[in-house]
Image (cartoon, rainbow, N blue to C red):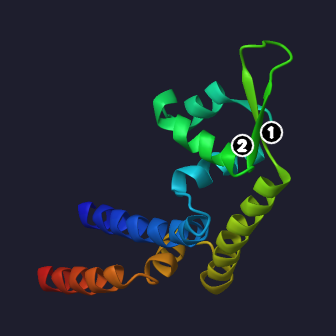
Amino acid sequence: MTDQNDYSLILFHFAYKTFINTADEIIEKHGMSRQHHRFLFYISKMPGISVKELLDFLEITKQGSHRTLSKLKEESLIEEAQSKQDKRVKNLYATKKGEELVKVLNKEQNKMLANILNTVGTDWFKVMEAYANQREGFKSIKAKYQLQHEEDL
C-alpha cells in the first residue's frame, strides 16, 4: 500500500505543477505571482467578500496579504468598498479588467483539463498521469520508480 501511496504523491506533485504552471506563466507576464492569481480568482468568484473573509478562507495573515492586495488595486484589477452594514469592513470586487484576466487564466487551465478528460476519461490516476507526463522530471522518476518495483518482484 505504501508504494501506491508514494506513487500517488509523486503523481499529484507533478500534476499540480503542470496545472498551475500554465496560469503562473500568464500572471508573471503581468508582473504578478501565484498569490495574486489566487486572490484575484476568489475575489472574482465571491464578489463583495471582505478582506477578513478572504484571508481566513485562504489561510493567510493580514501581513502576508498587504502587498498582494495593494498590487491588485494598483493594477486596477480589484477595488474595495466600505461595507454598508459595518463601515470598518472592506469588501472586495474584481474590476472589469480583473474579470478579463481571470477569464484568460481560467481559459488555459480549463482547456488543458478538457483535453485531458477527453483523452483519458475521469479516472484519477489517468488524469494525474496525463498532467504529470508533461513534466520531464516526472518521466525520469516514473522510469526509475517502475524499474525499482520490477526488481522488488
SS at circle 1: loop
* Position above or below: 91 against 125: above
Q: Position of residue 117 (x, y in %)?
A: 65, 77
Q: What mark, if any, has residue 147 been given in the picture?
A: none
User: Which residue corresponds to the image point at 85% horizontal and 54% vertical from the top-left?
Assistant: 96
Classify residue 147 by image quadrant: bottom left
Name the residue at the front extreme: 74
1 and 2 marks in contact (CB < 8 Å) = yes
State left or right for residue 20 relative to residue 112.
Answer: left
According to the picture, the residue beneath numbered tag 1 turns out to be 47
User: Which residue corresponds to the image point at 44% horizontal and 83% vertical from the top-left?
Assistant: 133
* Position above or below: 49 against 138: above
* Position above or below: 120 against 27: below
Please state which of residues 56 and 74 is positioned toward the viewer in this rendering.
74
Q: Amino acid at mark 2?
A: Ile
Q: What mark, if any, has residue 43 been given in the picture?
A: 2
Q: Position of residue 85 (x, y in %)?
A: 84, 13
Please state which of residues 31 and 17 is positioned toward the viewer in this rendering.
31
Q: Amino acid at mark 1?
A: Pro
Name the residue at the left extreme: 151
Q: Residues within 10 Å of mark 1 (few under 14, many from 20)?
A: few
Q: Position of residue 125 (x, y in %)?
A: 48, 72
* Position above or below: 8 against 55: below
